[in-house]
Image (spheres, rainbow, N blue to C red):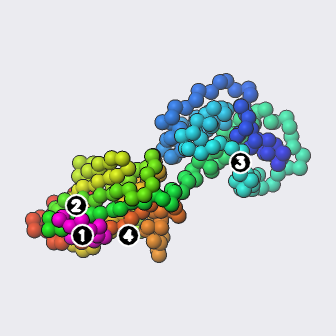
Amino acid sequence: MSPLDVERLLWELTANEGVRHDAEPTRIPDDDTLRAFRDDELNEDRTKEVETSLAASQQARERLAVLAGVPLSTPDPAIREAILDQSFPLPRTEPARRWWPAVAGLAAAAMVAAVVSFPLLKTPALPEQVGYEVSMTGLATERSTTEARELVQALPETRVRISVEPTGMSIDGLEIGLYRQSKLRLHRLIPDSHLRLETHRGAGLFEAAAADLVGAEPGIHSLYVVVAQRRDLPSEVVLHPGDDPLEALEQGSRRRAYVRQIKVESSTIGNDSWKERGR
């Protein structure tokens, strides 16, 4: 494929009404399918179907861009060059035009994910004015204070409450997540029968037994509260030796992350039920 033909293909992917002129009309994927495609949650066959739809339909690409909250534009020059270098390291000097009608659709389907997803997957930074106060309560003797401390004491069975309140600018479309660290991995704690989460007007309140949050092992354990745009809270973050968990979670200014600690004391119940419930 010559540079001229590649340039033409890249342009048509983002600016033309339809790359595959000889194809049958393509059904536009619904919003849930497009979101799942963007989050890489579809199986291989379904992913190929969506890529084909995106390659054939400007309307589908525009809808994907709307769901991502970014404008759909022609490829950034740096992105275009990266795609060309990876896909066509040795372009031919004499292009064979005869294959263009038959191959354009297949090439578009193969490249649309790269061309479209580069701008969409780059989640914009949160405004500097967005901030939160994270307060936590543990044992009953500590609940009378209003001080926003970063360390509380708790028994494994103690109900711990974590309050997340906006202190600055409030914007729509944000969600609050809770993470705990296990060696070089940060795992998101999903609300369920053991972990309760209430949200209201940008604020959040987590409540759970200390053992369900950080385990029943005595000692000081860290929890991370993270605020991010909707669908931008990963289920797991892998750290490298020496990485700062807060920096890894925030990814620059993409998210807001706060660390709080629970000092777990030896249980007065004296059984192993909490260890069995460790998640």
From the image, state whether disc 1 or disc 3 is nearer to you.
1
Q: Which residue is mark 4?
A: 183
- x, y percentage for residue 81? 75, 55
Q: Do we see residue 276 in this rendering?
A: no
- x, y percentage for residue 237? 44, 61
- Check residue 160 in the rendering and tell me which mark sits there, or answer none: 2
Residue at the far front in the pictured view: 168
Q: Which residue is nearer to you in this view: 200 or 17?
A: 200
Q: Do we see residue 218 in this rendering?
A: yes
Q: Amino acid at mark 3?
A: Pro
What span is colored magenta in the figure? 143-155
Check if residue 206 falls in the magenta segment: no
Q: Is residue 5 above or below residue 244?
A: above
Distance from the alpha carbon under mark 4 to that under mark 2: 23 Å
How packed mark 1 is, by other alpha carbons closer than 10 Å (few <14, some 14-19, many 20 or more), is some
How packed mark 2 is, by other alpha carbons closer than 10 Å (few <14, some 14-19, many 20 or more), is many
Q: Which residue is mark 3?
A: 75
- x, y percentage for residue 114? 64, 48
**Is residue 188 left or right of 240 when viewed as pictured?**
left
Check if residue 149 falls in the magenta segment: yes
Count of all numbered marks drawn on residues in the image: 4
Distance from the alpha carbon under mark 3 to that under mark 4: 40 Å
- Check residue 152 in the rendering and tell me which mark sits there, or answer none: 1
